[in-house]
Image (cartoon, rainbow, N blue to C red):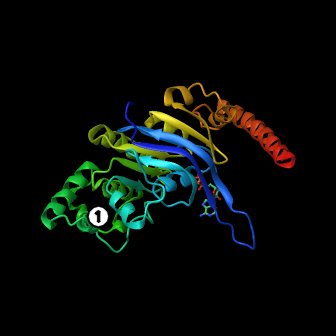
Amino acid sequence: MTETLLEVRDIVVDYPVKGFRKPPFRALGGVSLEVGPGECVGLVGESGSGKTTLGRAVLGLAPVTSGSITYRGREISRLRHRERRALAADLQVVFQDPYTSLNPSLTIEQILTEPLIARKTDKQLARRRVRELLDAVHLPSDAGNRLPREFSGGQRQRVAIARALALDPKLIVCDEPVSALDLSTQARVLDLFKEIQARTGVAYLFVSHDLDVVRYLSHRVAVMYRGEIVEWGPASQVTVRPEHPYTQRLFLAAPVADPAKQEQRRAERHRLLALQREQDEQMEINA
Ligand SMILES: Nc1ncnc2c1ncn2[C@@H]1O[C@H](COP(=O)(O)OP(=O)(O)OP(=O)(O)O)[C@@H](O)[C@H]1O
């Protein structure tokens, strides 16, 4: 990748903590990565490692204490509301839960035309665009007249993807977009993400706790642990020959087909995680 679309440099995010004079909670402790045009960067790590926070920081939804986020060379981490709205065509998001991310009282057509109408797109053009979008995510053309509750989880996620695509974005932050779906639906939605990327050249910052998902889609992978990126590089390297001990442990946790091997991995992982916790606790005591 020669050009950089998104560049995150030393981002620190502190969440305020309720309570008198309580110090804020540092969710990201100086994180850097980049995403090239048309690239998929996978973000993996256990629950609480800061993946969602990083995605939210890119979208302007997390309180950035320091560091910079540049999109096509422009600093975007502290934009005003209006400037952020102007950027919405380029930066989009698909959330985890297709059951709560769509307005239940709007038809699919209304959901898909909303961002277009907000950009003053002519009504007829908007209608044509809805048909294109439904086609792009392999939903029938009459889906537009129906409500979200008439669709399965996988179909709803297709609607959410169509909505994200409505304004031809350059980058989509995908926050665990398949983890609420059953396995066979997951595979079909992942194929759709791949197909759309090949056709439109959109880039993804793809957050997932599932290494197989990340391995399948990503060109580069960042591994997060306790608010930091502990390993970053080409997917072929990070997912096949991880160098950082934490990544190696994380990979041991990934499910495998053979139950005996799975059990062996599980025991090994428990041992390593217990060891890690002990070391972390010791470091905290010493600090
Ligand atoms: N709004 C918030 N206020 C305070 N703390 C928060 C907030 N959002 C997240 N955190 C904390 O920041 C840390 C990172 O959370 P984050 O959701 O980014 O992790 P994650 O890796 O995406 O986890 P998961 O996979 O469970 O979603 C966690 O300890 C979490 O409790």
In the figure, residue 15 lies in which quadrant? Answer: bottom right
**What amino acid type is highlighted by mark number 1?**
Pro
Q: Relative to 93, does residue 236 appear above or below in the rendering?
A: above
Image coordinates of residue 192 in percent, x first then y, are 34, 44
Q: How many marks?
A: 1
In the figure, residue 82 lies in which quadrant? Answer: bottom left
Q: Tell me which residue sits at (37%, 68%) in the image.
A: 149
In the figure, residue 129 lies in which quadrant? Answer: bottom left
Q: Tell me which residue sits at (31%, 43%) in the image.
A: 196
Image coordinates of residue 70 in percent, x first then y, are 44, 47
113 relative to 242 in the view: left or right: left
Q: Quadrant of the N terminus?
A: top left
Helix, strand or loop for disc 1? helix
Q: Tell me which residue sits at (51%, 49%) in the image.
A: 68
Circle 1 residue: 115
249 relative to 151 in the view: left or right: right
Ligand 1 shown in quarter: bottom right
Image coordinates of residue 176 in percent, x first then y, are 50, 51
157 relative to 223 in the view: left or right: left
Image coordinates of residue 143 in percent, x first then y, are 25, 61
**Can the viewer see residue 47?**
no
Given residues 124 and 229, the one toward you in this image is 229
Structural crowding at the residue carrying mark 1, measured as other residues with C-alpha within 10 Å and reported as few (<14), some (14–19) or many (≥20)? some
**Can the viewer see residue 144?**
yes
